[in-house]
Image: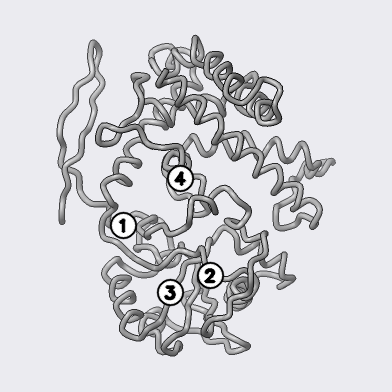
Amino acid sequence: MPTVAATATIRKPGGVYRFIALRCCLCSHLATTKQTMTQTALFLDEIDGFKEQPAYEGDSVWGCDWGSGYFHVWRNGIYKRLKPEVFALLDFAAPGDVIVIENAHMQPQTIKSLAQVFTIEQLLGIKNTATAKNIDIRLWFHSQTPKWRNILGMGDKTDEIDAETIARIIEKRGIIDLQYFNPRVCYPPRIRWAHEQLDDMNTILNAARIDYKAAICPAVKYFFATANKQTQFKAWNMYGPHSAIATDINTWFYGFENRSGISLWAALVNWDGLPREYNGQQPGVKFIMNELLRMKPNHFRGGVARSNLMHHGFRNYAIQQLGTRKTGKTNKIKKLCEFTSAEQSKWLDLRQRYRRAMVHTLHAMKAYLNT
C-alpha cells in the first residue's frame, strides 16, 4: 500500500516532541470524493436545496438509491431494481444521461456500514465505465433526501420513492453545484493534514469539558483566561459593538457555557495554543469552515467541534426560537422534514445568520491571533 510522510506530535511531561512518521493512505474512508461545491454555496441555502434554482434542461436524469440489496433507479416513470454488479455496468443509462445518487452509496466499502457497496477498485471501474459511455455521475447530499421527500410531497419512504425523489429534486434545483463522482485512493495532503487537526481539536474540546483536564491544556487555559474576552472585544472593534452581527456573535459564541466559542478557537490553535499552520501558513476561514469545522452537507468526521456548534449550539437555539419542541409526556422534538413552510423559512434564516456570525467570529479571532 502506498505511504506518505506526515508530521506527528507526541506530548510528554516537560516537552513536545515532533517526528516524521510514515502514514498509510486512507483508502477506505468515507469522504474520498472531490469537493466541487463553491464556497459561496457553502454558506447559502442552496446546500439544503431550499432555494429554488432553474430546472435542469440537460439530458435524461436517473435518480438512484440503494436499499435491500439492490440499486433502485428511476427516470420519467421508468423504474428498475438492479443488483450491484448489474448497476456497475451502467447499461440502464444512455450516452449523455446523468446519474444522480446519494453520496454515501458511492464511497469505498467499509466493515462498519452497509451503505457502501463497492470497493475502491470497483468504484474506479465504475468511473472508467461512465467516462467510456459518456455518462455523468453526480452525488446528492444524502442527509437532505428526507427533507426533499417532504417538500415534494412524495409520501412515505421506500427505496423506489427515494430514487424518484432524487430525480425530481434535480428537475427542481438543477445539478450545477452537485459533486462529481471522482473516487480517490488517497486524500490530497492538505485534507490529510485537516484530518490530523480534527483529531487534535477533539482532544482539546474533550479536555475543555473536564475542569482538571482543561487546566493542563494551554489552548483551553489561555482561551478562558484571556482570549475569550479579548477576541470578543476584537469583534466589537471590527464590526461595531452595537451592530446586528456583533449581537449575534455575543449571543451564540460568548455565552455562559461558551462551548461554541471554544470550538471556534480550537479550529484556529493547536493543543499548545499556537496558530495551526499548513506548510508554514495559517489556513483561511473558508478552509476552516469547510474542512476543520465540517460545515458542509457531507460532513463525514464531523467531530466534537461540529457537534458543539450545530447540535448543542444552533439546534437547541432554533428549537427554542421556533417552538418546535412538543410538550407533554414524550417531549418530542419536531423533525426538520416535518416543518411547515413558515417554519422552514425561519429555520433557514436562523441558520444563515448563525453561519455568518461564525465566519465573522473566526475572522475576529484570527485578527487577534495575528495582532
Identify which amino acid the numbered label 4 is placed on: Asn
Image quarter for residue 279? top left
Q: Which residue is mark 4?
A: 290
Q: Which residue is mark 1?
A: 28
Secondary structure under tag 2 reads: loop
Horizontal and vertical percent for residue 263?
50, 29
Secondary structure under tag 1 reads: loop
Image side of residue 189 versus residue 90, left or right: left
Quarter of the image where the C terminus is located: top left
Looking at the rendered structure, the number of numbered marks drawn on it comes to: 4
Identify which amino acid the numbered label 2 is placed on: Ile
Identify which amino acid the numbered label 1 is placed on: Ser
Q: CA distance from mark 1 to mark 4?
A: 21 Å
Q: CA distance from mark 4 to mark 3?
A: 23 Å
Horizontal and vertical percent for residue 133?
35, 86
> Which residue lies at the image location 17% right of the left edge and 47% below the top edge?
4
Residue 68, numbered label? none
Q: CA distance from mark 2 to mark 4?
A: 20 Å
Report if the CB atoms under discs 1 and 4 are less than 8 Å apart: no
Horizontal and vertical percent for residue 136?
42, 77
Report if the CB atoms under discs 4 and 3 are less than 8 Å apart: no
Choose between 296 and 239: the one closer to the eye: 239
Secondary structure under tag 4 reads: helix
Identify which amino acid the numbered label 3 is placed on: Ile
Choose between 73 and 254: the one closer to the eye: 254
Q: Dot 1: within a 10 Å radius of its alpha carbon, few (fewer than 14), some, or many (20 or more) residues?
A: some
Image side of residue 260 versus residue 149, left or right: left
Q: Which residue is mark 3?
A: 137
Q: Earlier in the sequence, mark 2 or mark 1?
A: 1
Q: Dot 2: within a 10 Å radius of its alpha carbon, few (fewer than 14), some, or many (20 or more) residues?
A: many
Q: Can you tell which of label 1 and label 4 is closer to the viewer? A: 4
Quick check: can you spot residue 330?
no
